[in-house]
Image (cartoon, grey):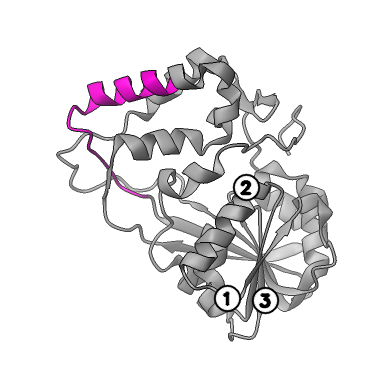
Amino acid sequence: MPDGWQWDPTLFRGSAAYYERGRLPYAPGFAGTLAGALGATGSDRLLDVGCGPGIVTLAAAPYFAEVTGMDPDADMLAEAERRAARHGVANARWVTGRAEDLPAGLGAFRAVVFAQSFHWTDRERVAAAVRRMLAPSGAFVHISDLKDPPPVAVPSARPAPPYERIGGLVRRYLGPVRRAGQGTLVGGTPGGEDLVLRRAGFVHLERHVVPAGAELERTADDLVAWAFSRSDAAPHLFGDRLADFEGELRALLREASPDDCFAEQPPPTEIKIWRPANGG
């Protein structure tokens, strides 16, 4: 958990409706890569902690007998349920709760997954709980965008999203220190995940990098959704200045691309699979 920060239920309040549209997708086939690396047989169970609107949970569903998404935000879980119904996924269930509530009577799992969510938790406590929940040959899985991906070989003719300018606008409205729920992240989110997991008894690390998908066309609506999908720019943080912020954001985007069209290359997806010393 970030130093000097305390979790509160407003961390992503109001962001659920924007998440799927705003966030870049994981690399195509990442769920198949994960299932293959785990040796999933179709009879296993997977738990996705901090699942948000079920992006990873639902992608993994075809490879497992049951997938469970867990999140403290009721709106995120409602969005996940809608997405499951839309895609005809019948083997997913949704649990309201924080990672610190584990094991929460959920049983044993072949994989417990954290997709860019582990840093929000009491990591030592959560890692220890996960280890106790693993079935034989089970694993702790961390999924994230690959940091510092290789440069794009052929730059697009369209402009890239002006993320630095968007960040500056957010800071002008919300202050220079990154917001997160009712608190701030003075030092950002923590690293050192590998050390935390080793201390919890996870010693066998297997790493997979799944190649990125094709360049995406992004509109102003997509980039507004990206901003509001984030904990540091969740809609509630702006209070009665929300409409003003969105208006200025849209004006900034029109200036950056008058035809309302940007191009962005999604990053590769990194999958880290940790197994305990005793093999689960």
Residue 65, x across and y down, in percent: 62, 81
Whether tag 3 and tag 2 are in contact, CB under 8 A, the answer is no
Whether tag 2 and tag 1 are in contact, CB under 8 A, the answer is no
Q: Which mark is residue 90?
A: 1
Number of the front mark, 3 or 1: 1
Asked which secondary structure carries label 1, the reply is: loop
For the image, the number of numbered tags is 3
- Residue type, numbered disc 1: Ala
Q: How crowded is mark 2: few (under 14 residues within 10 Å), some or many (20 or more)?
A: some
Give the residue number, with chain letter if any, for mark 3: 45
Kindly tell me whether residue 54 is visible in this rendering. no
Which residue sits at x=38%, y=50%? Answer: 267
Which residue sits at x=46%, y=33%? Answer: 227
Q: Earlier in the sequence, mark 3 or mark 2?
A: 3
- Residue type, numbered disc 3: Arg
Q: Residues within 10 Å of mark 1 (few under 14, many from 20)?
A: few
Q: Earlier in the sequence, mark 3 or mark 1?
A: 3
Q: Disc 2 and disc 1: Cα gap in Å?
A: 20 Å
Residue bounds of the magenta highlight:
245-266
Number of the front mark, 3 or 2: 2
Whether the magenta-drawn stretch holds residue 257 is answered as: yes
Quarter of image, res 61: bottom right
Asked which secondary structure carries label 3, the reply is: strand
Give the residue number, with chain letter if any, for mark 2: 75
Q: Which of marks 2 and 1 is nearer the N terminus?
A: 2
With respect to residue 28, does 176 lie above or below?
Answer: above
Residue 84, x across and y down, in percent: 53, 66
- Near-viewer residue (75 or 8): 75
- Near-viewer residue (77 or 173): 77
